[in-house]
Amino acid sequence: MKYLIGGLGLLLFLVIAWLASSNKEQVKLRPIIIMIVLQFILGYILLVTSVGQFIISGIANGFERLLDYAAEGIQFVFGGLMNPGESPFFMNVLLPIVFISALIGILQHWRILPFIVKYIGFALSKINGMGKLESYNAVASAILGQSEVFISLKKQLHLLPKHRMYTLCASAMSTVSMSIVGAYMTLINPAYVVTAIVLNLFGGFIIASIINPYQVTEEEDLIVVEEEERQSFFEMLGEYIMDGFKVAVVVAAMLLGFVALIAMINGIFNAVLGISFQDLLGYIFAPFAFLMGVPWNEAVYSGSIMATKLVSNEFVAMQILSEGAESLSARSEAIVSVFLVSFANFSSIGIISGAVKGLNEEKGNMVARFGLKLLFGATLVSFLTATIVGLIY
């Protein structure tokens, strides 16, 4: 029965994408089928096989070691503020972003990450039937982040038409930055984080190639990566450390505001309607959760977590999931966890359009105009990835 429901869900999400397509006749089936098959193969390897467990264990242990190293710095600076037996979210989950951001800066400075991004992007372009620029951007977004990635394409922004800008922005919203992957792993199972990152990479191409199909000529497909003025090692290191701290503080501020607002809205809805706002959203999202493979008796709770991610952000939703994971079966937890690992939420529209506008005002305004369609596509990517995990698990 799970295969029937999951298969119907998978088909429905693809049909929804097709109905929203800007050019239905130009949708290419062959690369879409290839990428869906690859998603199933990679998902199965990562979640079911001993090889996948070994890979995920290695990645999780690596991030655990990095978080331990980060804890040394946090303890040195904030040790006197931490009470024994307590686990402050800002200290243990957000501040390690500073250390991981510094490591990303070092790998960028030594030209290791640009090399990896270039050749993985080139290989992906042979699979997805899209341009090399789109493939480069998808890989770069997963490392640099949804706003920072556009800095590396600053020289090309003014040349890009609307349809290509949509795909670039959709990739940025569907992936997550490597600097916060460690933070996710403290809240949900690392296996689901790694699986979502890999599957979302292909899912972004699948949905974008259905919603927004187009052909790219060889002349249009030149990658001109913006080269920043060469800094000394310690200038670069200081800049990335400060950038990591800014990210941690911004995420903390967003969490503070959203958690407080959701608590207030829940209180108002409870007083007026006798039902919380999150429970109400849960009923709206429950059918989608069911089609992704969540049993109906768990669908409302799962739907409320998914909706919370959409209207606030993934950290708020992951925190709720981690506190109530015992309410879900292992399979439902896997499906919901994978759904949460992306930047697909309303605040990301402002983040991405603002980042592009800071580099090119005309293109930033263009992104803002198709912002809701961008969120629609990125959310479909999360539905697609989570459904595939539900069929595998």
Image (spheres, grey):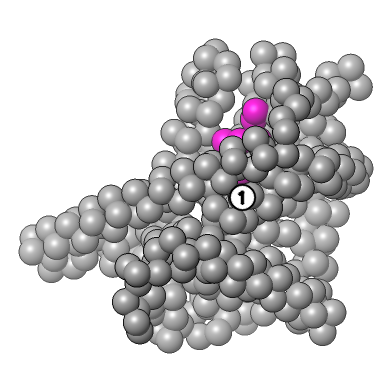
Which residue is found at the position 54% from the left and 53% from the top? Answer: 98
Question: Is residue 246 among what the camera can see?
Answer: yes
Looking at the rendered image, the quarter that the N terminus falls into is bottom right
Which residue is found at the position 34% from the left and 69% from the top? Answer: 80
Q: Is residue 273 left or right of residue 258?
A: left
Residue indicated by mark 1: 101
Identify which residue, 162 or 296, lies in the foreground: 162
Question: Is residue 128 among what the camera can see?
Answer: no
Identify which residue, 224 or 66, lies in the foreground: 66
Q: Position of residue 245 (x, y in %)?
A: 48, 48
Q: Position of residue 240 (x, y in %)?
A: 60, 42
Above or below residue 66? Residue 239 is: above
Residue placed furthest toward the left: 271
Residues shaded magenta: 145-151
Q: Determine if the magenta segment contains residue 147.
A: yes
Above or below residue 199? Residue 222 is: above
Q: Residues within 10 Å of mark 1 (few under 14, many from 20)?
A: many
Numbered disc 1: secondary structure:
helix
Identify which residue, 212 or 336, lies in the foreground: 336
Above or below residue 317? Residue 114 is: above
Q: Determine if the magenta segment contains residue 166.
A: no
Identify which residue, 389 or 224, lies in the foreground: 224
